[in-house]
Amino acid sequence: MSDSTLIRLDGVRKRYAMGSTELWALNGVTLGINRGEYIAIMGPSGSGKSTMMNILGCLDVPTEGLYYLNGQEIEKLTDDELARIRNREIGFVFQSFNLLPRTQAVANVELPLIYAGVPRKERHERAQEAMVKVGIGARAHHLPSELSGGEQQRVAIARALVTKPALILADEPTGNLDSKSSDDIMALFDRLVQEGNTIILVTHEADVGRHARRMVRLRDGVVVEDHLQ
């Protein structure tokens, strides 16, 4: 792989047992993603998007085939090594925000740094910096219940950014937002890509997918479309 390659999937297949039946959620996916790319992975329900997200996010491993992230062959890593990769190399943004409800916004952003063993003063400074970066620095000491949906998602994005990960993986990031907040979040992603971040959106919404510079479409576990847009 070249130095610019962040992700390489080579013949990836994923099988799930459904009673006596086998389901191939991914069926031979080969894909390369370079640093700084902005990609939308799209497809209807059952196309394999969620399975693809879980494998890219090191939440699951392929049944067959190879997955390289930052030059590391993921299947060869131990559970502890996978947890370290998830914490330091991947920033997750979910539809449901996944914030701790009784914890101030800045402390939510600090969480990955706590798991990484970063000292308190440094992690607080880095969390504040990440919140300013996403335009929500003034709300650092509010609880999630005191924030709008769009603000909560900005906190979640700050949390994803705080470890300076190689990859931001966003799963339906506007699914719980109104149209104005959705537009604001997508504008933020546009800016983050311009600043050099690598972002993969997993979405079924065409208007969200149109923000990406490359679109990969899945159907029945197979890549049926892959083009710049």
Image: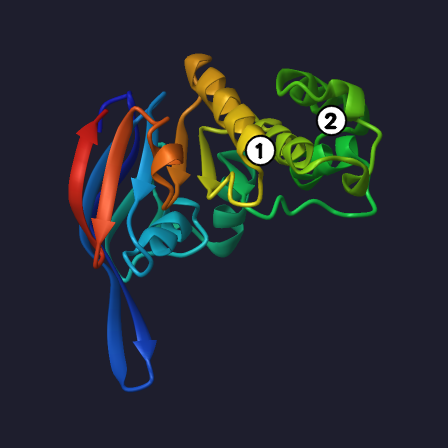
Work out whether residue 209 or residue 70 is closer to the camera in this orientation and state it: 209
Residue at disc 1, secondary structure: helix
What residue did someone put label 2 on? 123
Work out whether residue 5 or residue 48 is closer to the camera in this orientation and state it: 48
Residue 12 is at least partly visible in this image = yes
Quarter residue 20 falls in: bottom left
| Quarter occupied by the C terminus | top left
Q: Is residue 31 left or right of residue 203?
A: left
Q: Residue at x 66, y 18 (%)?
A: 135
The way the protein has been coloured in the rendering is rainbow
Quarter residue 185 falls in: top right
Badge count: 2
Residue 150 image position (x, y, % from top left): 64, 33
Q: Residue at x 80, y 29 (%)?
A: 120
Residue 86 image position (x, y, % from top left): 51, 43
What residue did someone put label 1 on? 160
